[in-house]
Image: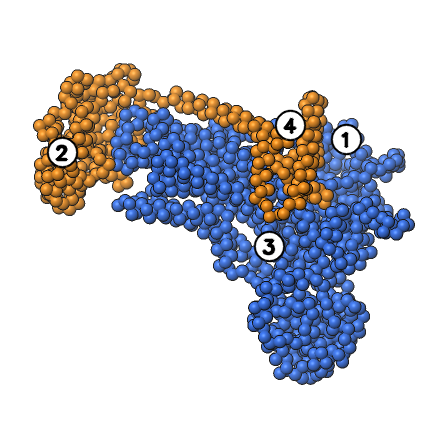
């Protein structure tokens, strides 16, 4: 009973109890009960007597502290009991900073130091792991490519929407498409392509054997290949006449090769509704395909100037003043264009709503 | 026993101290004032019974109740009174409606937080639904899942509670009863509930008394008042007034006590709730019971976790708004943080752990009615009992011997023969240490064999002295040599008494006479030898009691009639200053006062009892323990635990199981909380570093409600690390279930390593697929853009939204698997808090099953076809399973070293900071 009474008094700081528990008979008895512990403790006393003395001193100090705290607490109990919040605040503040002993803060500081070292070693561990990770990963070729296959499809102009709504007579409604296309095609300028890239033979892979880390050459894809959709003759890409050009490109995948002799083709049609809503589409290059010479792709590091091949769709006769859903699909071996969950794998769907 | 619990019409019952013969019919008016009076009524009920009817002569009695003492009441008059007073039943305690209980389960603890999460999900879905043409249904599903989790957990805990209370309902409905009354001169058998005040009742041997009776005639009538007073000796009943105290006088029979033999006739002076028994019942049912210690602990823990969750949630909600995220996104982050912070499955785990212990205890004949009471016994610091003899008479035997740094096993079987041939082989008898040990055990021992038992095997011989010393005596006699000879050679010079302080205090509360009580108390060791009461000291010193400083006497015997006049302060004084206390001749009300006194002093009180008279104390106690065979229905109903075989030794089992489950719950919670950090950190990094989300809410739920459940539960099967019975009872104010050391370990240390394991796997998968860590920083905005279908990775490859989402979900799956793998190590280190796993061993088969189960579940979730659409979990490459193993090993090694240091430096700094 006496034991309970002693501990009945609320502690002045959360640590006070621990001292009491840890340093006084209660916990010690736990260990004394465990004979093995006792033996170990004795062994320790013999080996490092100095340490033990120090600890005892500490314990004495701590006990004094407890007594003081208890006295304080007794004084405090005289106060009206409604001040629970104030008491709580006192507990918290004494936990942070015990003005008499400066113990709490010292201890907190020690914990922080220990945690600092703990986290520092964890940081070292993760660094080591990441380092080994980089040792196992090739900078030229991703370890796995199956998640990025089959290739996805994207169109330009791209304005965070796949609805092309514009009014032919109001340039403001289509001007941003033109700017976007122009910007996109800067990299395809004939002069630039001729300067940077090589003209490689069509109809066959452009395979560059040799060391992985060798820089690879890239095949030219000139803006002029896109003819009416190149923006060279018609700087508005047909938007001013209600015959918009839309560029289609296939996502780059390192090492991807279309079937030999069977280049990937693009074909567009009305996705839902009347098929005659689109009466004619012109494709540039006229083959409507991605030539084999643009494959394989060797990756960003070595294949620096690689230029993605494009197919331009020129919607020359589309029903006006009505939304026309268009689906453009890739066709060819190794191409999948009917994944239900992913509407950008092997196909792209957009709507044209051209107002006059 | 009356028709306790019969669901008749409930009438407002009078709680006046003195039952009145007539009642006014304005019951409605009284009903209004009743509620206000409730509290004062309860105080009133705690006072002693005041009854005057036993002092009346028969004529006065006849006049008072206007009844003819031979003819009885007229049937018409009886009907009238019945209409006025209501049936003669005990009013069932007000039960809270099932729906209310269910709703309480639904809106308590983490449920509120999860409801908030679910509502936020629906709000987010609503906003998305209005903003976009094609909203993702993720939030809708998540909201539904969260709501389902809350409802299922609620149902689960409700079912647990409802199931245990149903057992009691069946008990309640057990005793139907008839009464023989004389009305209008005719003997008629009626249902006991139709008995009214003034009825002339006839009882014979074997009957139960149908109401409080004032006897008018008797032929050799004896009654058993044990349910009321605790005294089982049948008492004579006759019409004579013999004692001032209504409980002691011969001419009153009490409702629900039984007539053992003879016959008697008496006038009903009180029915239903106004009977002495009814008052006890009202007192019992009216008592407000405090929360169980484990409920307090769980609440404390829930507050802690909720505080952490709210802190993280609010600060990161604010942060994300500051960082420029939209309201909707911030709300979705908030949902994620809430889901990650709340250990959804933990409360169910705790319930299952407690249920398992309850079942284990039920096998040992301890039926636990209220699950939370499972642990209470473990925390118990004071036991109030009047049957302590059996409690301390549990036999002990030597099972293991430890010397020369080796533990030897002793033969504990009863059948061993008298000679020591079977024993000697098991341990090194030649050792010098053994010689010393045996001498100490034999000589420093006060136990001795009783005379004339030489023919019996040693193990079966009766001994004098305490159980542990007797065990040592028998052991030495069996294995070493005759203790008698040894003692003859080494005569006793002096004696230093051994006193084990780490015991719970046992207070004896009995209805017996003080002298009997004291004798028993000394006999069973409640008053230990050498300790004297103030009276003893006075007698010894031949001085009056007033000259003795009562504080010097450790033992104390208090008479019930003294207790009646004591103030609360005086009682506190007694409880504080005496370690060995006996209360004698106590009434039910006084027992209650004693329990309240102990609780005021901060003790966790267990009360054992079987009679109706114990029920208020049983109900008020932190854990009331009733007897399954001899116990009355009322006591069983008031108690939290029932000893099915009435064996008090089961209480010790209960204490052990209670302490064990408390330790194991700590482990279980430490295990479960650890995975919170790898669940929260992905969201934090997602918000701060703008990387693709490493772990989604669905996978978090898979961990919390799937893989973590069985392993956490398996820790409930863990055996104790050391002798938990040698510990002092837990101090409920400082030994918390979840303290900041546990949180520090789980969140600050192991959790962090686990988070690293997860993140490493995440980075491996992304890097191997093309996204190197350096390119991931800040990629989030493009990554989450549905229309950005040619996002470039570190190799220049272009990814559609869906492709990279598949990759992201693969990462979620891998992160999840990594947590599972890191949790293997965590489970193994959580097995022990102090010992090494190598000391503890891997004997817990359920735990091994748990590890297998979580692994198979993880593999199942990852590889089952269709999981990609159902839970968005994707198959992993085999190598990705191994990314987390170094961290798993790190966790194991780290914690083994930590525990090694703790063992080497008991009470040292590390222990103070990390021993939870």
- Residue at the (19%, 17%) spot, across then down: A196
Of mark 4 and mark 1, the one earlier in the sequence is 1
Secondary structure under tag 2 reads strand
Q: What is the letter of the orange chain?
A: A
**SS for dot 3:** loop
Residue for badge 2:
A245
Can marks 3 and 1 be said to lie on one chain? yes
Residue nearest the observer in this picture, B230 or A173: A173
Tell me the blue chain.
Answer: B
* Distance in Å between CA atoms under marks 2 and 3: 78 Å
- Return the x and y of residue B898 as percentages of the image width and height: 58, 29
Indicate which disc residue B904 carries: 4
Tag nearer the camera, 4 or 1: 4
For mark 1, give the secondary structure.
Answer: helix
Q: Position of residue B288 (x, y in %)?
A: 61, 57
Q: Out of B698 and B26, give the one closest to the viewer.
A: B26
Indicate which label's residue lies in the foreground, 2 or 3.
2
In-image side of B497 versus B662 (left or right): right
- Report how far apart the C-alphas of labels 4 and 3 lie in the structure: 42 Å
Query: What residue is shown with label 1?
Result: B434
Q: Position of residue A184 (x, y in %)?
A: 19, 28
In which quadrant is the C terminus of chain B drawn?
Answer: top right
Q: Do the residues under discs 3 and 1 have CB atoms within 8 angstroms?
A: no
**Tag 1 and tag 2 share a subunit:** no
The chain identifier of the residue carrying mark 2 reads A
* Residue B369 badge: 3
Number of the front mark, 3 or 1:
3
Q: Residue at x 69, y 43 (%)?
A: A4
Q: Earlier in the sequence, mark 4 or mark 3?
A: 3
The lab-note entry on whether marks 4 and 2 share a chain reads: no
- Quarter-of-image position of residue B488: top right
How far is mark 3 from mark 1, CA to CA? 47 Å
């Amino acid at each position: 009973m006496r034991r309970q009474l002693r501990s009945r008094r609320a502690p002045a700081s959360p640590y006070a109890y621990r001292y009491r528990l840890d340093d006084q008979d209660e916990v010690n008895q736990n260990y004394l009960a465990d004979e093995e512990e006792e033996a170990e403790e004795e062994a320790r006393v013999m080996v490092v007597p100095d340490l033990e003395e120090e600890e005892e001193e500490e314990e004495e100090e701590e006990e004094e502290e407890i007594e003081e705290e208890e006295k304080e607490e007794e004084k405090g109990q005289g106060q009206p009991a409604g001040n629970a919040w104030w008491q709580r605040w006192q507990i918290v503040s004494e936990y942070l900073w015990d003005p008499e002993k400066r113990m709490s803060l010292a201890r907190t500081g020690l914990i922080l130091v220990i945690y600092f070292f703990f986290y520092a070693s964890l940081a070292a561990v993760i660094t080591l792991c990441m380092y080994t990770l980089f040792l196992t990963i090739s900078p030229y070729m991703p370890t796995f490519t199956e998640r990025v296959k089959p290739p996805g499809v994207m169109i330009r102009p791209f304005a965070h929407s796949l609805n092309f709504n514009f009014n032919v007579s109001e340039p403001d409604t289509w001007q941003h498409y033109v700017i976007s296309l122009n910007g996109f095609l800067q990299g395809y300028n004939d002069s630039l392509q001729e300067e940077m890239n090589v003209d490689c033979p069509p109809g066959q892979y452009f395979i560059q054997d040799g060391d992985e880390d060798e820089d690879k050459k890239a095949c030219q894809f000139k803006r002029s290949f896109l003819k009416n959709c190149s923006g060279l003759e018609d700087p508005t890409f047909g938007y001013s006449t209600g015959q918009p050009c839309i560029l289609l490109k296939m996502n780059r995948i390192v090492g991807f090769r279309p079937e030999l002799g069977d280049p990937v083709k693009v074909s567009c049609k009305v996705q839902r509704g009347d098929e005659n809503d689109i009466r004619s589409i012109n494709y540039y290059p006229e083959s409507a395909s991605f030539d084999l010479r643009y494959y394989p792709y060797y990756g960003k590091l070595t294949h620096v100037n690689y230029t993605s091949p494009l197919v331009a769709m020129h919607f020359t006769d589309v029903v006006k003043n009505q939304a026309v859903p268009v689906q453009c699909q890739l066709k060819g071996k190794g191409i999948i264009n009917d994944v239900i969950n992913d509407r950008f794998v092997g196909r792209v769907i957009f709507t044209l709503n051209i107002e006059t | 026993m009356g028709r306790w619990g019969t669901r008749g019409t409930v009438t407002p019952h009078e709680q006046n101290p003195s039952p009145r013969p007539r009642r006014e019919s304005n019951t409605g008016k009284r009903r209004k004032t009743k509620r206000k009076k409730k509290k004062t009524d309860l105080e009133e009920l705690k006072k002693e019974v005041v009854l005057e009817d036993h002092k009346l002569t028969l004529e006065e009695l006849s006049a008072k109740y206007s009844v003819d003492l031979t003819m009885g009441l007229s049937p018409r008059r009886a009907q009238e009174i019945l209409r006025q007073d209501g049936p003669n039943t005990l009013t069932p305690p007000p039960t809270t409606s099932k729906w209310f209980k269910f709703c309480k389960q639904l809106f308590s603890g983490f449920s509120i937080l999860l409801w908030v999460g679910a509502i936020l999900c629906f709000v987010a879905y609503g906003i998305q639904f209005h903003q976009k043409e094609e909203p993702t249904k993720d939030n809708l599903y998540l909201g539904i899942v969260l709501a389902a989790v809350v409802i299922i957990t609620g149902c689960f805990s409700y079912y647990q509670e409802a199931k245990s209370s149903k057992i009691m309902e069946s008990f309640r409905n057990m005793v139907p009863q008839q009464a023989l009354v004389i009305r209008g001169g005719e003997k008629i058998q009626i249902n006991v509930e139709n008995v009214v005040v003034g009825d002339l009742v006839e009882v014979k041997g074997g009957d139960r008394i149908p109401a409080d009776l004032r006897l008018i005639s008797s032929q050799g009538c004896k009654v058993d008042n044990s349910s009321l007073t605790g005294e089982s000796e049948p008492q004579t009943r006759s019409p004579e007034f013999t004692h001032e105290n209504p409980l002691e006088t011969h001419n009153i029979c009490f409702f629900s006590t039984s007539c053992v033999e003879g016959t008697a006739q008496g006038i009903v002076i009180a029915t239903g709730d106004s009977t002495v028994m009814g008052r006890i019942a009202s007192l019992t049912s009216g008592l407000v019971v405090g929360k169980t210690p484990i409920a307090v602990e769980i609440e404390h823990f829930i507050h802690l976790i909720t505080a952490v969750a709210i802190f993280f949630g609010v600060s990161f909600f604010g942060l994300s708004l500051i960082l420029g995220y939209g309201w909707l996104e911030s709300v979705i982050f908030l949902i994620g943080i809430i889901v990650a912070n709340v250990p959804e499955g933990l409360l169910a785990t705790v319930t299952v752990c407690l249920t398992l212990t309850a079942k284990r205890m039920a096998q040992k004949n301890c039926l636990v009615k209220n699950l939370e009471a499972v642990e209470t016994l473990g925390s118990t610091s004071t036991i109030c009992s009047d049957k302590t003899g059996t409690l301390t008479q549990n036999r002990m035997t030597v099972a293991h011997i430890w010397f020369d740094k080796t533990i030897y096993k002793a033969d504990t079987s009863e059948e061993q023969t008298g000679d020591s041939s079977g024993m000697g082989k098991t341990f090194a008898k030649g050792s010098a240490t053994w010689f010393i040990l045996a001498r100490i055990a034999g000589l420093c021992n006060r136990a001795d064999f009783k005379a004339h038992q030489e023919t019996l095997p040693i193990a079966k011989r009766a001994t004098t002295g305490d159980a542990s010393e007797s065990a040592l005596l028998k052991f030495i006699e069996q294995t070493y040599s005759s203790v008698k000879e040894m003692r003859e050679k080494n005569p006793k010079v002096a004696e230093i008494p051994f006193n084990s302080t780490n015991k719970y205090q046992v207070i004896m509360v009995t209805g017996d006479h003080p002298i009997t009580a004291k004798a028993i108390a000394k006999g069973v060791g409640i008053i230990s030898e050498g300790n004297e009461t103030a009276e003893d000291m006075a007698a010894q010193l031949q001085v009056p009691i007033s000259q003795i400083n009562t504080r010097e006497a450790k033992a104390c015997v208090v008479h019930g009639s003294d207790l009646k006049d004591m103030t609360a302060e005086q009682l506190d004084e007694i409880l504080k200053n005496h370690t060995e206390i006996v209360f004698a001749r106590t009434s039910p009300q006084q027992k209650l006062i004693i329990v309240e006194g102990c609780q005021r002093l901060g003790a966790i009180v267990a009360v054992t009892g079987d009679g109706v008279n114990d029920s208020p104390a049983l109900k008020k106690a932190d854990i009331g323990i009733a007897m399954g065979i001899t116990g009355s229905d009322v006591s069983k109903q008031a108690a939290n635990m029932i000893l099915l075989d009435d064996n008090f030794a089961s209480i010790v089992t209960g204490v052990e199981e209670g302490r064990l489950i408390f330790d194991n719950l700590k482990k279980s919670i430490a295990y479960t909380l650890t995975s919170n950090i790898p669940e929260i950190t992905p969201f934090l990094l997602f918000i701060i570093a703008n990387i693709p989300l490493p772990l989604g809410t669905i996978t978090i739920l898979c961990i919390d409600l799937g893989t973590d459940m069985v392993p956490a539960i398996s820790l409930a099967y863990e055996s104790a690390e050391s002798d938990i019975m040698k510990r002092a009872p837990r101090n409920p104010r400082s030994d918390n279930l979840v303290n900041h050391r546990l949180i520090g370990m789980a969140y600050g240390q192991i959790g962090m390593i686990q988070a690293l394991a997860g993140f490493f796997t995440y980075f491996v998968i992304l890097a191997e697929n093309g996204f190197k860590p350096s390119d991931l920083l800040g990629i989030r905005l493009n990554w989450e853009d549905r229309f950005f279908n040619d996002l470039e990775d570190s190799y220049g490859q272009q990814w559609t939204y869906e492709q990279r989402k598949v990759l992201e979900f693969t990462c979620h799956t891998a992160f999840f698997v990594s947590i599972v793998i890191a949790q293997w190590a965590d489970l193994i280190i959580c097995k022990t808090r102090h010992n090494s796993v190598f000391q503890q061993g891997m004997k817990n088969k359920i735990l091994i099953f748990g590890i297998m189960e979580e692994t198979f579940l993880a593999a199942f979730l990852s590889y089952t076809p269709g999981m990609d659409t159902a839970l968005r979990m994707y198959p992993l490459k085999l190598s990705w399973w191994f990314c987390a193993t170094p961290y798993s090993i790190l966790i194991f090694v780290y914690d083994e070293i930590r525990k090694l240091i703790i063992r080497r430096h008991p009470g040292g700094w590390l222990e103070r900071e990390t021993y939870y």
